[in-house]
Structure formats: C-alpha cells, structure tokens
Image: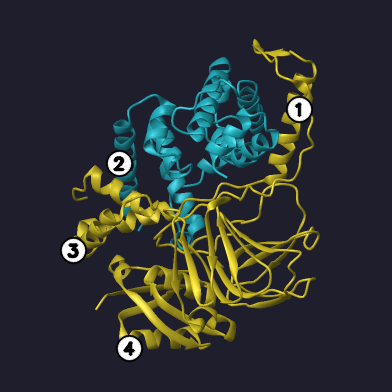
Chain colours: A yellow, B cyan
Amino acid sequence: MAYMDEHHYLLIIGYLEGKITEEETQYLLQKVQTDKEFSDAFEDIAEIWSARKAIPNNSSKANDALARLNKKIDSLEASGSASKNGLVETRHPITIIRKLRPILTVAASILVLAGAFWLYKAKLSNKPAGTLTMTEKHTAPGEKKKIDLPDGTVVTLNASSSLYIANTFGDDKREVYLDGEAFFDVKRDPQKPFIVHTGKIATQVLGTHFNVSAYQNDSNITVSLVQGKVQVDMNNDPSKRIILDPGKQMTYSKANHQAHVTDFIAEDITGWKENKLVFNYDSWPDAAKKLSRWYGIPVQLRDSTLLRCKLKGTFDNIPLAKVMEQIKMVADVSWQMQGNKMIISGKCN
Amino acid sequence: MDDIELLSQVKADDREAFNSLFLKYHPLLSDFCRFLGINSDDGEDVIADVFLDLWVKRERVLIHSSLKSYLYGAVKNRVYTLKGKNQKMQLLPEEFASDKAISDHLRPDEMLFRKDRRLIIERFVDELPEQGRLIFMMNWQHQLDYQEIAEILNISPNTVKTHIYRSVNYFRKRLLFVK
C-alpha cells in the first residue's frame, strides 16, 4: 500500500465526521480529484466509517435504570445525611421528591455520516426519549402516505419516513416528531400551537403550509414555507430563533449547527407530493440517497470524483432505469445492478 | 439543551436535568461497558454508581473539557477497578464470544450490505491490540474526539491520533483481501 500520512487520514476522517473547515474541505475535494492514492484512501475510510452502527437506544431499559437510580437517590437523601462510599450528603431533602416527568427535550442521539458512500436504510429512531406513548406512521421506500390528524391537519409523508404523534396531541399543544420528509397543511388554531420536532430543530406554527425534510442520514434539515408564517427554534435557544416568510426556506447544517435562509421554488421542494422526483442542485451523494429512498434499493457511488458534481432535474414518476438513462444523457456516468443494489460510476464533466 | 446547560441546572439541584443527562448517556455508556467486557448487570451498576456519584458531588464536580469525557472516564475507571478485583471478568461475555468464532472466509454476498460490512469491520477491530482497539472504538463508535480520548486514557492527543492512523491503515490492508 502506498504511503498516505497521518495528516491525510485524519483529514478524511474529519471530513466524514463533518469536523473540518471549509478550506480543508476544498483541499480534500481537490486531492480526491487529482490524487489516486488519496481517493483510494478516501473510499476505504468512507467505507469503514459508514459501517458504523447506531448504538441501540433502548429507552425502556434506560427508563427502568433511571427509576432504580432515582429510588436510590431518594432513599439516600430522605435519610438526611446518608453516606455512601464515604460521601456525605447534607443537602435539603425537601426539594428532592419530584415526580419523574416524561422528558420531551431529549432527542434520540443521531449518528450522522456526512458524505458516507454506503447508503442503506438505517432504522434509526428520531423518537424522543422518555415514556410518552406515541402513535407511529411509517412509509416504506417509494411509498407516500396522507395522514389525517385529529385536528384536521393533513400530513403528506414522503418515502422512508416516520411520523410520531404524541398521545397528548391537541391537549394544549399539537406536537409531532418527524424522521424523514413531510408536507404539512396545518389547520389553523391559534390556541394550540403545532410543533414539528426534528432532532435539534423545532418548527412551530399556528396554521400554514410548509415542508420539512429531516432524514437522519442527510447532512441538513430544511424547513420550507409555502404559506403563512412559521417559527423555527434551534437547540431550545431563543436567541437563534428564525421566523420564516412565505417562499423562504431555512437550511440547518447538522455538521456546524448553523442555519441560513434562502428563497426556493415551490416545485423543487414539494414536487415529491405530485410524484415528481426532483433533484435541485443536489450533490451526487444526496442524489443517491434520494434515489435510494424513492426506489427502495441501496445505491452506491463507486467513484469519489462524483462528489464534486451536482444534479438538477425533475422526473415524472418514471422507472429507475429511465431516470438513469436520462441522467446518462447529460452526465458521464454508468451504472450496474449487483443483486438489488445499484452501483453508479463515472466522473464529472 | 446541551450538556453544559444541563450540568449547570444539575448543579442547581434540578433533578429533571439530571434525568435528561442519564437518559441521554445510558445507551452510550451501556454499549461502552459491554465493549470493555463486563456483563450487562455489572454495566448497569457501574453506570448507576457514576451518576449517583455525579448527583452527590454535583456542587463540587469539576469537568475539564466535556461532560461526555468525564462520564466515559468515570465508567472506564470503575470498570477497570471491577475487572482488577475479579479477573474472570476479563473474558468476553458469552454472547460476544460466539461472534468471534465465525470463520474468516466471507461469502461474496456477505459484502453486500452495510450490516455485513459492519461485522467485517468489527472483526478487524477485534484483531487490533487492546489499547488500539479501545481508542479506535472510542473515536469511531462513540464519537469521542482526540482530546477527550486523551483525557480519559491519560495519554497525549498525538498518541491517540497515531493509534487511529495505525488502526485505519491496518483495516485498509485487511480490506484488500476481502475485496
């Protein structure tokens, strides 16, 4: 194996973890294009990194353990100045006995693989931790579903997505949790705010039409407003609040926790509702993920040189082979099927 | 809410903030305990002790770089103490021992899916020397950064980087044979 130094490895790993600067990213992308050793190493490391599994989040086990721990703490503190392992506790025990309330603020931990080459539908969960009971709605790859919520709101769920509806929905708030993409047509009710939770982002509205895209394995969360007004909160931090006007879209990067607002064209964002597969200057890795969700097969990019290309185009619900045929007419790519997996190779032109 | 905010609320006696931290880290620390080779009951005890200790000492606990590295460090120390007391526990728990017996030959179709790729990488991880294995898993699986790992293991960040580099190099050599 040819010589690749430590610095280069760590740079590639940093890229995959989303931890390097814009400048370093430019350097890396240029190296991938021009240096065979580097691009080979990139592919290998991307493969190793994408093989990382999500740590199972067994919330009932965690809740049980927490209940036991709380009992222990309560009995320790109820005895006033109990001691354990030689530690003396002398705090006011009155404040302690508070009921364990379900914890809404804890989003499940997310493993984000920015730029990973291996795309496979990972069943990670975007559900909040805690003991809340939820109604769950899922879509398979390629499937779309219309969901009528009890308040008259209509949610259209895109492929490979999950929507969790809190059983307290409509009590004083209307709260749902989304992993994937959905279009919301929210019934107006100023008394009960409608809130969509997606990881660290909470989108709150009173009544409006908007689209949220928040797939676990995507590097961004986007909220696009068609009509009305929405309020987007990040990390529960009011100083970072963004209010969107119609025609505006907020893109939040999970890598650097920054958000920016841009204009958007409605069809590019909501085309999926009319069965249009839309690539809107998507990078090849993003496009591959879209294909994978739309057609329900794993899609692999063989050549890292494809990383630099972007795709723009709309396809009217046609078979995968037709889509690839049309892409091939404008881009220097080829593809092959290996089992049920599609492998795309080629280069930027 | 991030760890720093939660921790400052814990310091102000907020049990709910404490509960949030526990629920956030329990799955990660359980996996870490399992990786360190103790069974899940002992792992639960270790995690509970670490959090109990955090609650009891909440006013005076000093976090150097991150709460995450504090918790991992505390868990690691307790597991090492436990293992020192009971040498038998250095054996891998049975359910993992059986995984290791799988033959080295991979069918071509085994390469197809990420799950299988993960198994292959995990097998390679098992082939690493102990310290390298621990460092790689802390970085790759548990997403601790080089500085955090250095603090937990009391070594320099450069040593951590060198271990990661060597591990990746080793995997690349091994991957050549399964491609």
Task: Name the image quarter holding the C terminus of chain A.
Answer: bottom left
Above/below status of B33 relative to A146 = above
Q: Amino acid at mark 1?
A: Thr
Q: Which numbered circle lies on residue B165?
A: 2
How far apart are the two marked residues, 1 and 4, measured between alpha carbons?
A: 70 Å
Question: If you read the primary sequence from the N terminus, does the residue marked by circle 1 or circle 3 appear first?
Answer: 3
Front tag of 1 and 2: 1
Q: Position of residue B81 (x, y in %)?
A: 54, 18
Residue sitting at 56 percent across and 40 percent down?
B28
Quick check: marks 1 and 2 in contact, CB under 8 Å?
no
Quick check: marks 2 and 4 in contact, CB under 8 Å?
no
Q: Amino acid at mark 3?
A: Thr
User: Residue tagged by mark 3?
Assistant: A34
Question: If you read the primary sequence from the N terminus, does the residue marked by circle 1 or circle 4 appear first?
Answer: 1
Q: Amino acid at mark 2?
A: Tyr
Q: Which numbered circle lies on residue A329?
A: 4
Is there any visible trace of residue B1 in the rendered image? Answer: yes
Q: Is residue B80 left or right of residue A93?
A: left
How many other residues sit within 10 Å of disc 2, few (<14), some (14-19) or many (≥20)? many
Q: Secondary structure at mark 4?
A: helix
Question: If you read the primary sequence from the N terminus, does the residue marked by circle 3 or circle 4 appear first?
Answer: 3
User: Residue tagged by mark 1?
Assistant: A95
